Image (tube, helix red, strand yellow):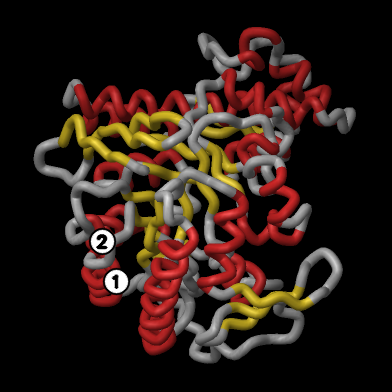
Amino acid sequence: MLKFTIQKKLEGTLARAGVIETLNGSIETPAFVTVGTKAAVKAMTAEQVRSLNAQVVLANTYHLYLQPGPDIVAQAGGFGPFMDWHGPTMTDSGGFQAFSLGAAFGSNVSKVTRNTDAVLEDVSPVKGQLAKVTDEGVEFKSHIDGSKHLFTPESSMEIQWKLAADMIFAFDECTSPTAPYEYQKKSLDRTYDWAVRSLNHHESLDTEKKQSLFGVIQGGRHQDLREHAARTLGALPFDGYGIGGSFTKDDIGTAVGWVNAILPEDKPRHLLGIGEPMDLFNAVEAGCDLFDCIAPTRMGRHGTVHTPDGRINLKNKSFTTDFTPLVQGCTCYTCTHHTRAYIAHLFRANESAAGTLASIHNLHFILRLMESIRASLFDETFQSYKQSFIARYYK
């Protein structure tokens, strides 16, 4: 039930602007997908998210499976109605938790790294990990009560069917960027097998074509693996494609470009877990249409906010008597009603409203950034806009 229309292409790049039509509304792309992990955008109500003109919300399959359970969400009509969100929706597959609760558990390893030389030859499980990957699926221990669970491509499809999102993802393994090449290759073969199993089971469940299934491209930092994944999964009848980590932070645009030069042009591409402004520009230029990340609200809850001149931390003493808005001229609720001094006071007083007000601004900032990027594609000022924004934000 998904229809994707490309409205504009930027000559000399893979960038494009378009519209994704779903059963619950349309998404103008490129677009940022707001993350509501547990059917809730942290520190914000659904009405506050709506007021920012957010277009689509993504929830986490693993977390909703554990709490409150997919059957309860299904009784509510899906996670959208459950949280009072009535626009387009997405769910991930639970595959990322294979990484976050497995290879990355208890470490500082992220799915995106700046260390291009780091390789851990030993990828065997370490003490304390809550996830173990096998060819059958991923064995989890609940982070809530320690109970054991098995996610397979088939069970992931069944859970996501009950969560009832418009767009869902095939089950995949997100590897560590420090995993050696041979493991990345083995994992890629496994992810392909899981993609086929996901596709087959999804088709048996969704006979009325209510959900759109995205395949997930992996392959680590390696061009040959990324391109192989794009060719093999691109040949399967998915409705769109997700592009997963892991790759180097400084070369996201190149790695994404490898993939998008091969994937079917007429299907949307979603870059998973990316929300840094520079990465958004680079990924748009490399042909991505959708992005999701918890960063805007996570930063906000910890006192850090976006401004055109970069990030500021409201917990710094200098803001205690700063009676200007977070950003002069910003039209979000926070900036039009409150000052830096007031929000800094809320953080020092441990008031929960602090995180809400900062999150409203951060999400507004990223959503407006994506709108401006989209507009710059249509009027062909993308390159100059990118250069001016980055020069100011990262000065």
Depicted 146 relative to depicted 308: above or below: below
Depicted 93 relative to depicted 32: above or below: below
Earlier residue among tags 2 and 1: 1
Instruction: Specify the farthest residue to the right.
Output: 349
Location of mark 1 (residue): 229
At label 2, counting other C-alpha atoms closer than 10 Å, the crowd grade (few under 14, some 14-19, many 20 or more) is many
Residue at (71% x, 34% y) in the render: 303
- Residue 245 visible in the displayed image: no
Residue at (71% x, 55% y) in the render: 71
Q: Quadrant of the N terminus?
A: top left
Which amino acid does the dot numbered 2 rest on? Answer: Val
Left or right, residue 229 beside residue 105: left
Camera-near label (2 vs 1) is 1
- Residue 156 visible in the displayed image: yes
- Which percent across, then down, holds residue 377? 23, 29
Which amino acid does the dot numbered 1 rest on? Answer: Ala
Q: Quadrant of the C terminus?
A: top left
**Hey, which quadrant is residue 326 in on the image?**
top right
Q: Secondary structure at mark 2?
A: helix
User: What whole-number distance in Å separates the C-alpha atoms at marks 2 and 1?
Assistant: 8 Å
Depicted 385 relative to depicted 33: above or below: above
Left or right, residue 231 beside residue 198: left
- Which percent across, then down, holds residue 76? 70, 41
- CB of mark 2 within 8 Å of CB of mark 1? yes
Left or right, residue 311 beside residue 372: right
- Which percent across, then down, holds residue 317? 76, 28
> What mark, if any, has residue 126 been given in the picture?
none
Q: Secondary structure at mark 1?
A: helix
Residue at (39% x, 56% y) in the render: 214
Q: Out of 346 and 141, give the one closest to the viewer.
A: 141
Location of mark 2 (residue): 259
